[in-house]
Amino acid sequence: MSIEIANESGVNVDEPALAGLARHVLDEMRVHPLAELSLLLVDEPAMTELHVRWMGEEGPTDVLAFPMDELRPPQPGGAHAEPGGSEPSGIPGLLGDVVICPQVAAVQARRARHSVGDEIDLLCAHGILHLLGYDHADPREHAAMFGLQDRLLASWRAEHGAAGGPVGSANGAAPSGSQDDEQPAPG
């Protein structure tokens, strides 16, 4: 699995840990081991520009996801693979880009009373789930996506001894204080 991280935010982020979390999420979601993912950390002006350009909304947001390829055909019985399910699909590809703004994450972390690292982890997992086709536009989708996000973060923390505060979506809420408009159409 290839996970590329580019930190253009000016904020110190534990990039190896973030790559490890991304790999954990992709492994748990049974994404092909040759798939590629790009994580980009940007500052508020850059995120604002992306938010306006792709979502038509003013100001910065916390996370945007730019899906690139369909990695796998729909799974029997549903549109998404479940963690621990069958073998990974034989179709590798470029999953897409997850863009995170650490400055917005810091504000949200203070509101949620957990660390900025925990918030960035949450946004990373959230963005990857969007790349995999999950959404939260209706209540059923919302419950499924945020339940899965919570389980993935909890299993990551359990495996790595991460203290981690509340996952930020105990009631299936969007990432703490999230402006959450992650899925612009790829350009």
Image: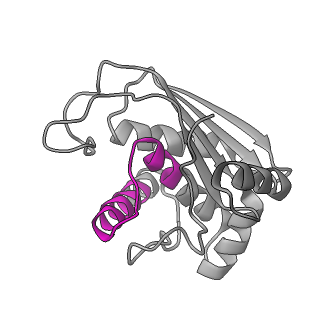
Looking at the image, which residue is at 41% across and 20% down?
A: 92
**Residue occupying the far front of the picture:** 56
Viewer-closest of 115 and 29? 29
Residue 26: x, y in percent? Answer: 42, 38
Does residue 91 appear left or right of residue 160 in this picture?
left
Residue, x 55% and y 34% (percent of image)?
A: 96
At 60% from the left and 75% from the top, the residue drawn is 177
Residue at 73% x, 58% y: name it: 102
- Answer left or right for 108 relative to 85: right
Please say if 95 is above or below 50.
Answer: above
Would you say residue 148 sits in the magenta stretch? Answer: yes
Write the start and end of the magenta stretch as one range: 125-153
Q: Position of residue 81 (x, y in %)?
A: 26, 41
Q: Position of residue 185 (x, y in %)?
A: 56, 42
- Can you say whether 185 is above or below 95 in the image? below
Check the image and report above or below for 36 versus 52.
Answer: above
Between 76 and 120, which is closer to the camera in this rendering?
76
The location of residue 42, given as percent across then percent down, is: 77, 49
